[in-house]
Amino acid sequence: MSAQAPDSQSDWNSRILLAEQILPLLSRLHREHNVVTSVFGRLLINVTSVDIIKSHRYARLVTDRELPLSSTLPILQELVEMNLGTASIDLGRLATGYEAEGASTGSLRSYLERELAEVVGGHSEKQPTDVVLYGFGRIGRLLARILIAREAAYGGVRLRAIVVRRNGDEDLEKRASLLRRDSVHGAFDGTITVDTDKEIIWANGTPIQVIYSNDPAQVDYTSYGIQDAVLVDNTGRWRDREGLSQHLTAPGVSKVLLTAPGKGDVRNLVYGINHADITDSDADNILSAASCTTNAITPVLKVLNDRYGISHGHVETVHSFTNDQNLIDNFHKGDRRGRAAGLNMVLTETGAAKAVAKALPELEGKLTGNAIRVPTPDVSMAVLNLTLDNATSRDEVNTYLHKVALHSNLRQQIDYIKSPEVVSTDFVGSTHAGIVDGLATIADGNNLVVYVWYDNEYGYSNQVIRIVEEIAGARPRVFPRRVAPTELF
């Protein structure tokens, strides 16, 4: 009789039993301490027993072996008894850290108290910050989905209202339907109902006030109980300080964030790169989250420049079509964009390469860029063709970028994959700003080509929400602390 494989039925059943013990502990941590857990970055929110097993199997990409559930269960049993404040705690890092150094220096409890010292005894109730979405298109509806999920997970920010123009008698029902169903990202995870009398969309128990207005300065948000709100303008109608300042004249709004590249002196932010530059000055009451492409490429360019130096380069973006293009051939004020988006590759320009310099001044004047719009609804790719100051090899670059994706404080911005089978639809729903395709990397001395996938809708929207939480002072602290990419070489 042959020996049983590791994934035999008995082994699977034992894992299920351990996962079922873990589930109520995850719930207690969240409910009693407002703590969210993960396994090497894979969040354990609204998970099943099978999800927990899969997350522990994912650990093999980090540690070269699966993480036993028997290693994380005792950690959770200790955590629920500790007085913890709001945080995101990585069980995988705690388990491997204790195995490597903690076990020989004391008990598990003492190890956890050392690693989580900043958050032990820090539990306190904090009033969530109000958020208003001005516009409710592709990005606006994804921001709504993420905000609703984040409120349930952390409670730091809450979606209070959306502002739109009324488009007929059934406007409210149609907007609720678009939030409920999405051709690219699937159905909303939860329930949505409509209160037509009060013009409210209820999403998973969150009341979203729908405000109809054509003039941002004419809305009194305080009349809806909204105070000191962060307003996210995802219409793209105004991109300079003068236009966006109209929002600040509306009672109840204290900050404005644009989901497009800002013009003039509006600060362009890429979370993970220059979000720490936000100040309390009036100038930073209006900010920009830059573009999806800028968010995708800037973190990768940053870590490559830090290690190898970039003398110059070209960014070619292969970008899914957007609502700005025509469905069939028709007049368009932009060059080439009048041709049918679903039938053509459309060569156009992009300001993403120049916009990188607003977040990374050290790359000012070193990058050029173009874009090709292609007949796919979501997920794009940036090809970074770089000339480096210091020579490297393909294996060295890939090893470095893989370490950055797994171990650095840019883990949420940069992901890494090395599979011969992945295509664009495999990255729909990615929360990362960009994903390096390791198999496509080309290196020849000082010449380097790196391919970066990105969900130009959902990945970008997650970057926007990270900035919203930063502005609101509601970003959950992540433990154990992660290192800067420069510490990896």
Image (cartoon, rainbow, N blue to C red):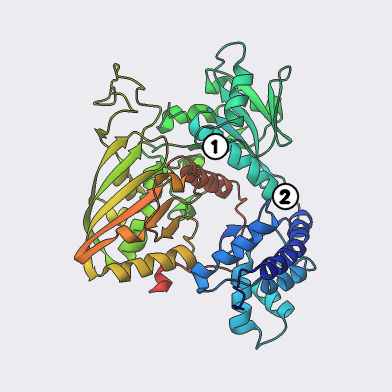
Horizontal and vertical percent position of residue 162 = 60, 28
Residue 391 visible to an observer of this rendering = yes
Secondary structure of the residue carrying numbered label 1: helix
Mark before the other along the chain sequence, 1 or 2: 2
Horizontal and vertical percent position of residue 71 = 67, 74
Above or below — where is 92 with respect to 383? below
Residue behind mark 2: 126
Residue lying at the far front in this picture: please name it: 1
Q: Quadrant of residue 249?
A: top right
Residue for point 43% across, 26% down: 237
Residue for point 41% across, 59% down: 417
Residue lying at the far top in this picture: please name it: 169
Secondary structure of the residue carrying numbered label 2: loop
Q: In this image, 424 relative to 56: left or right?
A: left
Report the front residue among 48 and 252. 48
In the rendered image, the quadrant that contains the C terminus is bottom left
Residue 255 visible to an observer of this rendering = no
Residue for point 66% across, 87% down: 105
- Residue 8's tag is none
Disc nearest the viewer among 1 and 2: 1
